[in-house]
Image: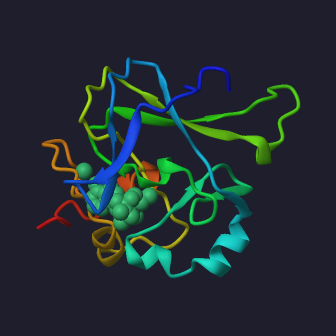
């Protein structure tokens, strides 16, 4: 991943959003690669066995890489594991496949990239948009309540089609 910086422009700090977060220590330009999200690579089955409690807890260090693999940042996790989510993020987590012709999904990599210029002191965020393979209930959506503080906050760290369907069926879920 040639565009990854040799010296990171970020540091781990206490966050206004939740627990620990990651802030910029230098100006980061739009499109710049910030950091790679790394950790032990495990299967979905292994993740389910080891972290079955995560889904109801609202807290996780797992990142779904693709249909086969999960990055478990509890083990050998980089500083990227401290990045919080926002519904109005300044960064995005892109999944890169190295060999487009002969892809090995285990070798996919997650790079956090700036969506706009980020000034020193600003907290780095991307939108987790979690999707879980369990029935969506108010309890589940509330367990994953989002505290990003944006006026555009959708109220939950869940996203994607499953959350959209839940919202359609329960338009007043936040009340
Ligand atoms: C990868 S960790 C990020 C580091 C986390 N702040 C910590 O100190 O452990 C992901 C977890 O942080 C929390 N978190 C991240 N962004 C959040 C947000 N916008 N609102 C509420 N909790 C958040 C949730 O518990 C989430 O599962
Ligand atoms: Zn939010």
In this orientation, does residue 168 appear?
no
Q: Residue at x 27, y 64 (%)?
A: 145
Q: Position of residue 33 (x, y in %)?
A: 51, 26
Left or right of 70, for residue 84:
left
Relative to residue 134, is residue 123 depicted above or below? Answer: above
Relative to residue 136, is residue 8 depicted above or below? Answer: above
Quadrant (top left, top right, bottom left, bottom right) of the N terminus: top right
Q: Position of residue 159 (x, y in %)?
A: 39, 52
Left or right of 41, for residue 159:
left
Q: Position of residue 95 (x, y in %)?
A: 61, 37
Q: Position of residue 62 (x, y in %)?
A: 55, 61
Q: Residue at x 32, y 68 (%)?
A: 141
Query: Which image quadrant is residue 3 in?
Result: top right
Q: Residue at x 17, y 44 (%)?
A: 150
Q: Residue at x 60, y 54 (%)?
A: 64
Relative to residue 27, is residue 18 depicted above or below? Answer: below
Left or right of 128, for residue 123:
left
């Amino acid at each position: 991943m040639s565009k990854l910086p040799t010296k990171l422009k970020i540091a781990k700090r206490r966050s206004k959003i939740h627990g620990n977060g990651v802030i910029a220590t230098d100006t980061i330009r739009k499109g710049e690669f910030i950091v790679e999200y790394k950790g032990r690579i495990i299967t979905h089955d292994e993740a389910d066995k080891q972290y079955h409690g995560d889904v109801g807890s609202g807290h996780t260090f797992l990142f779904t890489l693709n249909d086969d693999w999960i990055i478990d940042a509890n083990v050998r996790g980089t500083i990227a594991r401290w990045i919080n989510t926002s519904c109005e993020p300044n960064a995005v987590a892109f999944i890169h496949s190295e060999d487009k012709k002969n892809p090995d999904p285990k070798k996919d990599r997650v790079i956090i990239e700036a969506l706009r210029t980020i000034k020193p002191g600003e907290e780095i965020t991307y939108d987790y948009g979690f999707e879980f393979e369990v029935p969506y209930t108010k309890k589940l959506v509330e367990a994953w309540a989002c505290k990003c503080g944006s006026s555009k906050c959708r109220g939950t760290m869940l996203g994607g089609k499953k959350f959209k369907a839940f919202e359609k069926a329960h338009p007043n879920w936040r009340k």
